[in-house]
Image (tube, rainbow, N blue to C red):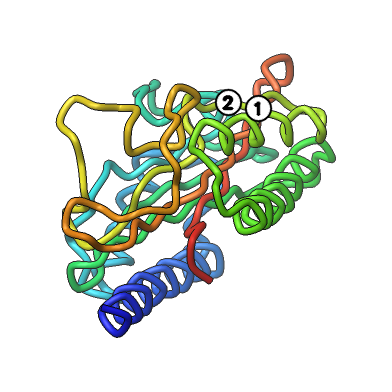
């Protein structure tokens, strides 16, 4: 079992490394640029991922959010916006690499607006702190981690913007309970201990997501990757 778990962990980390490489290419190849729509950027990323890795399967919808749309959580489908010259944007992608899921989110800033730059940097710091908090609390429950994400948002001077702060990840398709948006999520009403095994006796692996917002300034930032590995 130990070898199986090691192989599963290595596969998930490799999927995440590939996603990170894709995001670096998105940034360096000028895909994120002003005067283009979110939908066009979405298509450009899809084409790049197919070219780089042969990816055509995503286990959740591809999220590209700019400007005021960065306030919106995953389940919403806001109107297609066009990036401005001095804008903020985040990506949330769930590519599947050789049957293993990645879930990766990052925020990008066009221009030099200090609030947007601070937001981008704060969510990265909060992710690292949230991961440290998880690893230093062996008995941690999902609702506790969600409350900690809310606290970090307040500590940095923001509001927490999402109804969850993470979820399970695994081999496609990962463990799910139909019509259940609580039990396998970092949700404020989920008292389940996060360290445990799934229905097949395998260790559960989790994603941590950080979504900070400022409603008055109409900006949000998002950062997401593996919580239990790396």
Image coordinates for residue 23, horizontal then vertical, percent: 48, 64
Element at badge 2? loop
> Residue furthest toward the bottom?
3
Which residue is label 1 attached to? 213
- 63 in relation to 20, above or below: above
Disc 2 designates what residue? 161
Q: Distance between the residues labelled 1 and 2?
A: 6 Å
| 222 relative position to 37: left or right | right
The picture places residue 181, in percent across and down from the top left corner, at: 30, 27
- Circle 1 Cα neighbour tier, 10 Å, few/some/many (<14 / 14–19 / ≥20): many
Locate residue 111, reporting x and y percent.
74, 46
Q: In the rendered image of this protein, does residue 53 appear above or below residue 196?
A: below
Neighbourhood count class around disc 2 (C-alpha, 10 Å): few under 14, some 14–19, many 20 upward: many
Residue nearest the viewer, comparing 16 with 84: 16
* Residue positioned 25% across, 78% down in the render: 1
Vertical order, 3 against 79 (above or below):
below
Q: Which of marks 1 and 2 is nearer the N terminus?
A: 2
Q: Which residue is drawn at 52% across and 53% down?
A: 32
Pick the residue in front: 58 or 30.
58
Looking at the image, how many numbered discs can be counted on the residues?
2
Helix or strand or loop: what does disc 1 sit on?
strand
Q: Residue furthest top?
A: 216
Verify CB contact (< 8 Å) between mark 1 and mark 2. Answer: yes
Which is nearer the eye, 150 or 60? Answer: 150
Left or right placement of residue 68 versus residue 190 in this view: right
Above or below, 78 relative to 193: above
Residue at screen point 71% across, 52% down: 129
Give the quadrant of residue 98: bottom left
Please tell me the numbered disc located at residue 176.
Answer: none
Q: Could you say where residue 227 lies in the image, as x and y percent from the top left? A: 51, 57
Residue, x 62% and y 29% (percent of image)? Answer: 147
């Amino acid at each position: 079992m130990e070898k199986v778990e090691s192989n599963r962990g290595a596969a998930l980390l490799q999927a995440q490394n590939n996603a990170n490489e894709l995001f670096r290419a998105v940034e360096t190849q000028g895909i994120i640029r002003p005067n283009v729509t979110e939908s066009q950027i979405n298509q450009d990323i899809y084409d790049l991922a197919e070219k780089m890795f042969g990816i055509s399967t995503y286990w959740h919808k591809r999220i590209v959010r700019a400007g005021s749309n960065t306030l919106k959580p995953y389940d919403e489908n806001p109107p297609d916006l066009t990036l401005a010259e001095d804008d903020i944007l985040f990506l949330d992608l769930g590519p599947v690499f050789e049957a293993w899921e990645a879930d990766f989110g990052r925020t990008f800033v066009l221009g030099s607006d200090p609030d947007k730059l601070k937001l981008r940097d704060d969510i990265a710091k909060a992710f690292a702190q949230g991961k440290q908090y998880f690893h230093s609390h062996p008995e941690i429950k999902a609702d506790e981690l969600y409350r900690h994400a809310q606290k970090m948002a307040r500590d940095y001077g923001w509001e927490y913007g999402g109804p969850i702060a993470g979820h399970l990840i695994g081999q496609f398709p990962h463990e799910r309970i139909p019509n259940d948006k609580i039990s396998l999520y970092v949700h404020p009403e989920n008292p389940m201990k996060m360290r445990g095994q799934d229905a097949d006796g395998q260790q559960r692996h989790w994603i941590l997501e950080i979504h900070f917002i400022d409603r008055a300034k109409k900006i949000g930032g998002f950062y997401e990757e593996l919580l239990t590995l790396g």
